[in-house]
Image (spheres, rainbow, N blue to C red):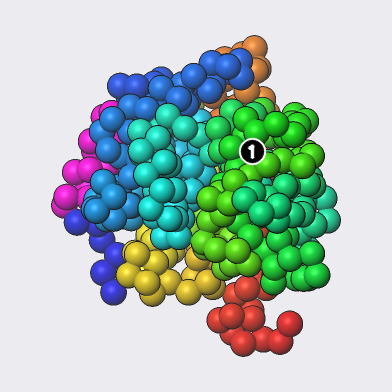
Amino acid sequence: MNFALTPEEDEFRAEVRKFLGGQMTRDPGPLPQNAYYSIARRIREGLGRRGWLTLAWPCEHGGEDSPIKDAILREEMAYFGVPRANDYGTNLAGPLTIRYGTGSQKARHLGPLANGKEWWCIGFTEPMAGSDLAAIRTRAVDMGDHYLLTGQKDYVEWARESDWCCLLARTDPDSSGSAGLTLFLLDMKSPGIFLNPVAYMTGRSFAEIFLDQVRVPKEGVLGGVGRGWEVAKEVLEEGRSGIEFVGWARRILDLMIEQAASEGGGSAGPVARHKVAEAAMDIEVARLLSYRSVRNRSRGRASTSEVSKSKLFGSEMCQRVAGTAMEVRGLAGQMARDNRWGDLGWIVHDHFMESIAGTIYLGSSEIQRNLIAHRQLGLPH
Ligand SMILES: Cc1cc2nc3c(=O)[nH]c(=O)nc-3n(C[C@H](O)[C@H](O)[C@H](O)COP(=O)(O)OP(=O)(O)OC[C@H]3O[C@@H](n4cnc5c(N)ncnc54)[C@H](O)[C@@H]3O)c2cc1C
């Protein structure tokens, strides 16, 4: 099997790097929350103007049908430290609306998704439904021409900044488990939505969402009543390529190499050299797994266990590489974003924290291991 990128894909990577390099200082450093989001918004709208937010979308919907170019873009955005805000919009809500949306849902949502103007969040997790997502208790009561949603969602990233939410709720009150669930496109300005901001270790925006009889018109159902589980599984798999871990880890590797070149000493000694070489190898494996799963998924050939492998390996690889950098960089590698020494060690610290989170969101490492054991290896539950 040939894993090499085509010359056109390599050229695209160079173009992306040039664009991102001109848009922002690599690693923007400590920023107040509003500056962080204005950078994210400016860059995403810039990407939208170039048609790069929709590279993986089918041509008939304005895309290029090129998931590989999309993966290249995402890898480079991670490398340059572009704030991850609204990834769920273009990468998850868009493809799902294309696949499952009605004509009017496509007409309403695809344009603002493609130009990066409307932001989306994902409302799946609940206090008693994380790994066991099928235990969802948020109710959606059928009122004839609309539904009334009542319940709570946890750990919703970018809930406060988002215009819309893909929200999973139980439409059949007598159902349990994965049956009787429905996915809704929820307007975040609807009356009855209350947000409680939650602090997050790397300063990302998080909130709990409380829903008190929130009205959603019937045309807000995505993919059909009772088909929520099927659509939600697609959301989770779509997000599991793990390519951003490759970008973050490459950035950390470059820092280690730059440090060894400028300081010499321990950071260029034999122990450090071997660790850096291992990190480079680890990154290469993660990258191959990631691009293979993206390529196979685009051909309808990637299995659940294949995407699980690339997400699991990528997130844990990033943690290993950041851990190595912390050792090699010494105390500076543990500095937080707002350290007053102006040391780039905070990037290592930040990516280490992010990679811990990466072993939890979109399904924890244990859940990915379960999926590989059951789905690929046929081990019993
Ligand atoms: C940074 C971050 C961003 C997130 N963003 C979102 C978001 O935008 N929207 C959203 O809906 N959710 C989001 N989540 C929530 C995330 O999907 C859940 O945290 C995750 O699914 C785990 O659920 P939980 O926290 O309830 O832990 P639990 O499910 O309670 O798990 C606790 C521990 O038990 C282990 N465990 C559970 N079940 C099993 C099992 N069957 N076998 C072996 N081990 C098991 C888990 O691996 C974990 O270590 C985010 C989480 C994080 C950390």
Decide if residue 247 is in sight here.
Answer: no
Residue 96 is a magenta residue:
no
Q: Nearer the viewer, residue 234 or 264?
A: 234
> For the stretch drawn in magenta, what is the main secondary structure?
helix
Residue 374 vs 95, above or below: the answer is below
Furthest toward the left, the residue is 7
Place of residue 154 in the rendered image (x, y in percent of width and height, measured from the top left): 75, 44
Question: Residue at 33% across / 27% down in the picture?
Answer: 46
| Placement of the N terminus among the 4 image quadrants | bottom left
Residue name at image x 64 percent, y 38 percent:
157
Which quarter of the rendered picture does the C terminus lie within?
bottom right
In the rendered image, the residue lying farthest to the front is 144
Q: 205 or 268: which is nearer to us?
A: 205
Q: Is mark 1 within 8 Å of ligand 1?
A: yes
Identify the amino acid type marked 1: Glu
Q: Which residue is mark 1?
A: 157
The magenta span reads: 7-20
Q: Residue at x 45, y 39 (%)?
A: 78
